[in-house]
Image (spheres, helix red, strand yellow):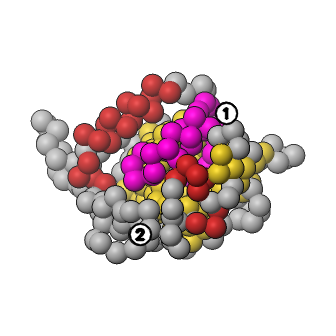
Amino acid sequence: MNTPRLALFLAVALLACDADRWGNLSPGTETDPGTGDGGGGAATMAPPVTGEGGDGGEGGALPSGDAPCVASSAFRATGMSFTEPTPKDLALALNDASYGYDAAPVTVVLRVAEEGTTLAASATELGSDDLYAFLGDAPDFVGASLWDGGFRSDTPQLSGSLRIEGVAIPLENITIEATTSSDCSQGIFVMDAVLPSGAGDLQIAHEISIADLAGAGGSLGWQLRALFTGESIPFAFEN
């Protein structure tokens, strides 16, 4: 299914209209990414807002109509947009480089098991067995919470990667929040992460380095935020 880019912009508008759901996130600076409470590291998210929905639809979380995900799923990004607090020129370059259904910079993998629910986000590639797997070293999964029509990471994921124009870009302190639909086969995602300063020499956007696009990142690097749509793909969960 070729997801129209219009769907992403509608998703962004919907998320903006319900900003309280995502918590009070401070934008951070180039040298000290915000946390929502003034500290360093990746932004944290407030718990989902829930309430009793009456006949008039009062209260409730961001509407989805989806039940909690009951099986493991992997969601490949099918349209992505970088926004604040991502440095502006870097955001524009990443938006251009990740445009289109086939760009697929990242995949969110959700594992649902009796011993607990976990997730990880990183770049993937299609194997010879027609199953997707993580590109390079697999990231460590972190605990995740499920609710009707969504899920999120409980703690930041230490490391992962984006694949932009064939370049693997390392990420740190990754958090994910998702609103799902179609029986947990599609979703709208918010990803916050830190791009470490050590990746500043990597080149994207016609051989322009990340550091030249983002400016001085200090010792901590640059905070990124990406909004994207995703759809389920066959994933090598047993690997």
Q: Quadrant of residue 2?
A: top right
Residue at the spot 37% in from the left edge and 30% down from the top edge: 10
Residue at the spot 41% in from the left edge and 69% down from the top edge: 32
Residue 102: mark in rendering: 1
Residue at the spot 31% in from the left edge and 54% down from the top edge: 22
Label 1 secondary element:
loop
Camera-side mark, 1 or 2 = 2
In this rendering, would 176 be left or right of 234?
left
Picture coordinates of residue 76, whole percent (x, y): 61, 44
Residue type pointed to by label 1: Asp
Residue at the spot 45% in from the left edge and 51% down from the top edge: 86
Q: CA distance from mark 1 to mark 2?
A: 33 Å
Residue type pointed to by label 2: Asp
Question: For the image shown, how many numbered marks are present on the structure?
Answer: 2
Asked whether the viewer can see residue 171, the reply is yes
Question: Farthest right residue?
Answer: 128
Residue 204: mark in rendering: none
Picture coordinates of residue 50, whole percent (x, y): 23, 55
Q: Is residue 40 above or below residue 174?
A: below
In this rendering, would 155 be left or right of 208?
left
Asked whether the viewer can see residue 44, the reply is no
| Quadrant position of the C terminus in the picture | bottom right
Q: Is residue 105 above or below residue 147?
A: above
Residue range of the region highlighted in magenta in the rendering? 83-109
In this rendering, would 125 be left or right of 61?
right
Q: Quadrant of residue 71?
A: bottom right
Residue 32: mark in rendering: 2
Disc 1 residue crowd, few under 14, some 14–19, many 20+, Cα 10 Å: few
Q: Is residue 13 magenta?
A: no
